[in-house]
Image: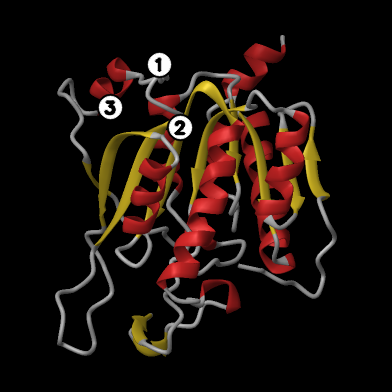
Amino acid sequence: MNVKSSEYSPNKCVFRNDEFGVWLYQANCIEFMDMLISKYPDGRFDMIFADPPYFLSNGGITCHAGKMVKVDKGQWDKSNGPEMNHEFNTAWLSRCQKLLTPNGTLWVSGTHHVIHSVGYAMQQIGMKILNDITWEKPNPPPNLSCRYFTHSTETIIWAAKNEKSKHCFNYDKMREMNSGKQMKSVWTMTAPNGDEKGLGKHPTQKPVQLLERIILASTTEGNLVFDPFSGSSTTGVAAVKLRRKFVGCELEAEFLALSSKRLKMAIKERTSSPDFVEVSR
């Protein structure tokens, strides 16, 4: 699957902050990961979060801000048929697997349009599926056709590099966040609010709260997190806040500009926090 952009510059670093460990590249994810694999054949990232194309832009309709709108997020979200879609998923997933450290883990979000292909591809390449998380949205847009149940969930698959991996799971932290009880695999969180989209909007933007939980569950401070489909860089924003390092890549110039604004804001907020002053001393 070839993704094109009129302003594409191969592997161009568009935002970096070495002090906080933040690097964002304009790149085709396949090309970028191939380059990284050649440099780090034994793996590089402690955790990867991926929000790949859902292949939803097929001429359908949905409800946005109370209005009927077409489901057309862009050329990058158009389906090329189930076989080619699965081929693409297998291609980028196999590269993510190679880029994980031996005990690293991968999280992938998606709807039914793509997530079954993702899960099957993970099994084909020998990854170990740890959990499937159901993200429940309490305020989903209504189904305007009145011919289906209202779509109110997304699935997030959590997988380890392979069967031998000894993955990180911060069980006590998750239990603490869940009022002292074991955290279940159904997470209820609202979609990104107005504050999170104050600098601009991405059509498939995830809530910062979701990425914070994912990062807290499976990494420790100082770990390196990667997002091959960075979009508006919610993964990076959460990583900065939680003192993890971040590498992201995105092809579209519009989303790279939005990401840069959000990452600058996240760094500014962290430097102005009281705990940052204490660490600086």
Q: In this view, does 200 lie above or below 236?
A: below
Direction from residue 217 to residue 101 in the image, left or right: right
Disc 3 vs disc 1: Cβ atoms closer than 8 Å? no
Could you tell me which quadrant the N terminus lies in?
bottom right
**Is 175 in front, or is 280?**
175
Circle nearer the viewer, 3 or 1: 1
Crowd band around label 1 with a 10 angstrom C-alpha radius: few (<14), some (14–19), many (20+): few
Residue 40 seen in the figure: yes
Kind of residue at disc 3:
Met
Tell me the mark number nearer the camera, choosing from 2 and 3. 2
Quadrant holding the C terminus: top right
In three-dimensional space, the C-alpha distance between marks 2 and 3, rounded to whole angstroms, equals 13 Å
Pointer 2 residue: 215
Residue drawn at 66 percent across, 45 percent down? 248
Amino acid identity at mark 2: Ile
- The residue labelled by disc 1 is 166
Q: Is mark 2 on a helix, strand or loop?
A: helix
Task: Give the image location of residue 227, x and y in percent.
Answer: 58, 45
Q: In this view, does 76 lie above or below 158?
A: below
Disc 2 residue crowd, few under 14, some 14–19, many 20+, Cα 10 Å:
many
Report the side of 162 relative to 7 (left or right): left
x then y, percent, for residue 266: 62, 41
